[in-house]
């Protein structure tokens, strides 16, 4: 990449890290905070579901707007939404106001994330896109790892301090983007006219006929499986192996570090050598096998190693899927990335909810479900790639 490209990518990475980290920073304090205001597990679940639900509803609309009014404006608007959300969260102890803050945060994430990936598509060539997307995905992974760690550390001083710090850092990011970030392309009448909100169902129906529909479905399945796995991870290792909070923290941090390293150093090389299609099939299969092996893990260390491979595989799949969708999207990058975010959000909502229900029935059922769904997905992917081979392996 040219120096100017690298500079823009770094700015986008900072924004993505702050966006994801600002959400992750509240994770360790959420249970204790909700108890302090007289709320419990249902409220905790709703806080996550409301955020993901708002993100899901807004994503296709936001993607369209990114095509129409420009990536820069959407990125700044998204960061502003996240900033407002954190300030509202910090200054209120009313559960209904907190729910509202999660709606605002979800909308902010929907405005931000597809615009960032569309921006990457604008400033990179086809050959550079996997590398650019892997950098952004690495920033996401780093936010997931560092956010909760910072939240836990700050909570030792004051339970709500992580919220204030998150809001202030997010505000700095807004100002930074206004000053530093330039528009990635000229908005033309063909892409810039205001086409008002189309219904979500209509947009989902449109996506069915797009050449990147199957990668969108795989994105949904990957998000579903990963969030289902993550949501019961702590409960499972505590129940099965008596793992301490410190051991659980080490597991989450280690898997996050592996994800970042893979996305920064390995993904681009793998894609250049083997192509998106082969990488997609191999690592969906690896993830499915790991879900199956989780059923037979007899020690904490063995389960730790399996979990490490699950996160390694999904850390490779995320940027590969983003790149594949981008390549197939042509000149509708904003809409495609918006739908990508929407499908991911569906998985983020359904995965934890269904995994929690199944876990209460039997603690191994979430892993069985993940194995079955991923097994079906690999068959769908292989069949689809046979029909799309010419499109998939050009420009790899």
Image (cartoon, grey):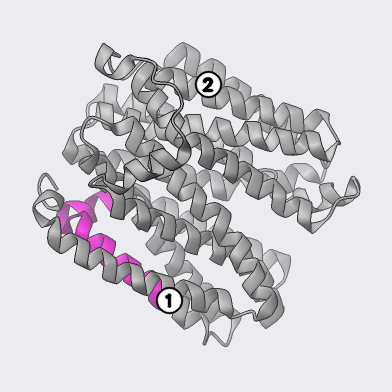
Q: Which residue is mark 1?
A: 372
**For discs 2 and 1, the disc positioned in front in the rendered view:** 1
Q: Residue at x 49, y 60 (%)?
A: 224
Judge whether 87 appears above or below 287 on screen.
above
Q: Image quadrant of residue 157? A: top right
Q: Residue 277 in magenta?
A: yes
Element class at badge 1: helix
The residue that appears at 43% across and 76% down in the rendered structure is 372
Q: Nearer the viewer, residue 237 or 47?
A: 47
Name above or below for residue 123 compared with residue 249: above
Q: In the rendered image, which residue does mark 2 sit on?
A: 77
Q: Which residue: 27% across, 12% down?
A: 189
Give the alpha-carbon distance from disc 2 to disc 1, as whole Å. Answer: 40 Å
**Residue 190 inside the magenta-drawn segment:** no
Looking at the image, residue 340 lies above or below residue 266: above
Residue 82 left/right relative to 383 = right
172 sits to left or right of 196 = right
Query: Which stretch appears magenta?
Result: 267-290
């Amino acid at each position: 990449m040219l120096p100017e490209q690298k500079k823009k990518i770094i700015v986008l990475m900072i924004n993505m890290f702050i966006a994801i980290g600002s959400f992750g920073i509240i994770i360790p304090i959420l249970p204790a905070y909700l108890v302090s205001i007289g709320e419990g597990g249902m409220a905790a679940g709703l806080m996550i579901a409301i955020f993901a639900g708002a993100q899901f509803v807004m994503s296709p609309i936001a993607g369209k707007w990114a095509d129409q009014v420009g990536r820069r404006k959407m990125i700044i608007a998204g960061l502003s939404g996240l900033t407002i959300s954190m300030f509202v969260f910090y200054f209120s102890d009313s559960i209904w106001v907190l729910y509202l803050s999660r709606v605002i945060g979800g909308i902010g994430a929907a405005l931000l994330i597809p615009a960032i990936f569309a921006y990457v598509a604008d400033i990179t060539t086809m050959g550079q896109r996997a590398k650019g997307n892997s950098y952004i995905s690495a920033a996401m992974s780093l936010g997931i790892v560092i956010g909760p760690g910072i939240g836990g550390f700050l909570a030792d001083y004051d339970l709500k301090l992580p919220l204030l710090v998150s809001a202030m850092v997010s505000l700095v990011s807004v100002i930074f983007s206004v000053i530093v970030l330039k528009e990635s392309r000229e908005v033309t009448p063909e892409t810039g006219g205001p086409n008002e909100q189309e219904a979500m169902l209509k947009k989902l129906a449109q996506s069915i006929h797009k050449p990147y529909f199957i990668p969108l479905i795989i994105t949904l399945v990957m998000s579903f499986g990963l969030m289902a796995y993550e949501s019961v991870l702590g409960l499972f290792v505590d129940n099965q192996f008596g793992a301490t909070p410190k051991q659980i923290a080490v597991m989450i941090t280690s898997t996050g570090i592996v994800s970042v390293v893979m996305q920064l150093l390995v993904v681009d090389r793998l894609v250049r050598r083997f192509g998106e299609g082969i990488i997609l099939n191999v690592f969906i299969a690896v993830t499915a096998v790991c879900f199956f092996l989780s059923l037979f893990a007899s020690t904490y260390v063995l389960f730790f190693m399996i979990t490490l491979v699950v996160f390694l595989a999904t850390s490779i799949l995320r940027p590969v899927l983003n790149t594949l969708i981008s390549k197939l999207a042509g000149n509708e990058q904003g809409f495609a990335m918006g739908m990508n975010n929407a499908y991911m959000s569906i998985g983020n909502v359904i995965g934890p909810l269904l995994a929690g229900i199944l876990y209460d029935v039997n603690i191994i059922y979430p892993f069985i479900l993940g194995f079955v769904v991923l097994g079906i997905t690999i068959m769908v992917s292989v069949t689809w790639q046979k029909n799309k081979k010419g499109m998939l392996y050009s420009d790899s």
